[in-house]
Image (tube, grey):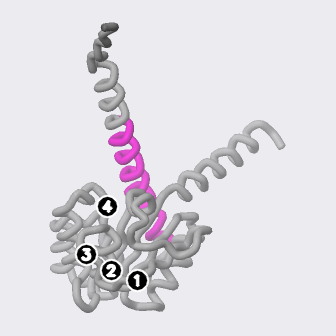
Amino acid sequence: MGDSEIEICRNIGDQKKQRQDLHVLAVDDSRLDRKLLERLLTVSSYQVTFVDSGDKALEYLGLIDNIDEENQYQTSSSSPKSSLHDKLQVSKINLIMTDYSMPGISGFDLLKKVKDSFWRDIPVVIMSSENLPSRINMCLEGGAEDFLLKPVKLSDLRKLHSHLLNSHCQKQDKDSIKYKENTTLLETRPLPVLSMN
């Protein structure tokens, strides 16, 4: 193998590792659509958590109280099912993909609740089998990053990768700023004077 071939292999490995660090919350009431999305996202090396309703998505994100104490979420990582209060996993969400038409809370309602919360910086992508321009415009104007027509294709997911990376980089920047602020606070805080008496 030449140096350029080795470099290409390294880049592919880096991209795959980077994608494994990206976590997608997928919301769809259709079992068939969830399975298709699971296959596409896991083939693309993303970590994915699936829920079957807008209510469960809000619960998973901590935006509403438990609606079902025994509720478990299906995650496509190597770990077994994760519980609602697994804050470490929830804090790593980089993208939310949701069906538009679901019983209870619709994908648009979920979008509005996410954009009105501390999750506002997380990109939300709406999916629908209905190509209605008024619905698409409403979602995009409401803050959706993109609107995908079902069935979702691998080429659709490739377009979303930049949204995922932007979200991931913004989160890393915020974490870095918090670290710097905390370090600066420690450095500028006066040390207590101890009396020898």
Which residue is disc 1 drawn over?
Answer: 71
State whether residue 12 is above or below residue 140: above
How far is mark 2 from mark 3, CA to CA? 10 Å
Which residue is disc 4 drawn over?
Answer: 123
First in sequence: mark 2 vs mark 1? 2
**Residue 77: percent from left, percent from top:** 57, 68
Give the number of the mark in front: 2 or 1: 1
Q: Amino acid at mark 4?
A: Pro
Which residue is disc 2 drawn over?
Answer: 56
Which residue is disc 3 drawn over?
Answer: 65
First in sequence: mark 4 vs mark 2? 2
Horizontal side of residue 76 vs 134, given as left or right: right
Q: Residue at x 28, y 74 (%)?
A: 58
Say which quadrant the N terminus sits in. top right
How far is mark 1 from mark 3, CA to CA? 12 Å
How far is mark 1 from mark 4, CA to CA? 25 Å
The reply to whether callout 2 and callout 1 are in contact (CB within 8 Å) is: yes
State whether residue 194 is above or below residue 115: above
The reply to whether callout 1 and callout 3 are in contact (CB within 8 Å) is: no
**Residue 72: percent from left, percent from top:** 45, 80
Q: Is residue 167 magenta?
A: yes
Q: Amino acid at mark 2?
A: Lys
Which secondary structure is most common in the magenta stretch?
A: helix
First in sequence: mark 1 vs mark 3? 3
Stretch of the chain drawn in magenta: 154-176
